[in-house]
Amino acid sequence: AQSVAQPEDQVNVAEGNPLTVKCTYSVSGNPYLFWYVQYPNRGLQFLLKYITGDNLVKGSYGFEAEFNKSQTSFHLKKPSALVSDSALYFCAVRERNTGNQFYFGTGTSLTVIP
Amino acid sequence: DADVTQTPRNRITKTGKRIMLECSQTKGHDRMYWYRQDPGLGLRLIYYSFDVKDINKGEISDGYSVSRQAQAKFSLSLESAIPNQTALYFCATTEGFSTDTQYFGPGTRLTVL
């Protein structure tokens, strides 16, 4: 069965420090990988995606993610956290061959402490 | 987010009532999805549709039905609402290409008393 794991429900980081939000997946083949962010009372917004090529993907708002095929991971990172980055973050995968469905992780709540 | 709209944004109803949540999109996408979000469970797929004549069940379709009235409109119905259907509901769209992301509506917060 396809699955996406976000092992941390909550991540706290001080403003200005680097942040990492973890994601691992178990999906057949080589899926496409996505990160979304959800601010309070809003829908999910696309941050970045990995399709192919360079393992380090850059996205919106200074975020980046590193794809690691051997560890089946796609961790979200940012070199210097802002208070405004506080939100709920979701990792998602989409099968490469069919692409019919997206599989989402359970979400990680990021709090950046001033 | 304005490309995908959902109505109503908030709804409180009673057990046993029939409820319809509506979704409209102006992105011209063929594929539309309904999810529910519960704390600690992330997003779970209820139904999805690839065109007007194509409806597919998702992970948690029991107790729900859908209607794809047009390419731009996809409605979710709760035939007889129950309290454990209290959740945040999202509509999303995507193009047919596997590399494309999903675009989400703002959500409908449904409370079943």
Image (cartoon, grey):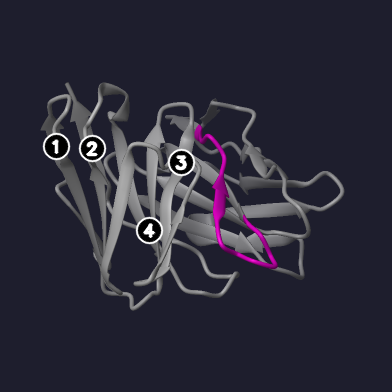
The image's mark for residue A14 is none
The tag earlier along the polypeptide, 3 or 2, is 3
Query: In this rendering, do the residues under marks 4 and 2 share a single chain?
Result: yes
Q: CA distance from mark 4 to mark 2?
A: 15 Å
Q: Which residue is mark 1?
A: B11
Disc 3 is attached to a residue of which chain? B
Q: Quadrant of the N terminus of chain B?
A: bottom left
Q: CA distance from mark 1 to mark 4?
A: 19 Å
Q: Residue drawn at (37%, 71%), measured in percent from left and top? A: B53
Q: Would you call the spot at circle 4 few (<14 residues within 10 Å), some (14-19), or many (20 or more)?
A: many
Query: In this rendering, do the residues under marks 4 and 3 share a single chain?
Result: yes
Q: Quadrant of residue A29?
A: bottom right
Asked whether B111 or B1 is in front, the reply is B111
Picture coordinates of residue A108, whole percent (x, y) = 52, 33
* Residue stretch rendered in magenta on the structure: A94-108
Q: CA distance from mark 3 to mark 2?
A: 14 Å
The tag earlier along the polypeptide, 1 or 2, is 1
The tag earlier along the polypeptide, 4 or 3, is 3
The reply to whether dot 4 and dot 2 touch (C-beta < 8 Å) is no
Q: CA distance from mark 4 to mark 3?
A: 11 Å
Q: Quick check: B81 left or right of A112? A: left
Disc 2 is attached to a residue of which chain? B
Q: Which residue is mark 3?
A: B43
Asked if residue A103 shows in the view, the reply is yes
Asked whether A60 or A91 is in front, the reply is A91
The tag earlier along the polypeptide, 4 or 2, is 4
Asked whether A18 or A76 is in front, the reply is A76
Residue type marked 3: Leu
Q: Quick check: B18 left or right of A113? A: left
The image's mark for residue B92 is 4
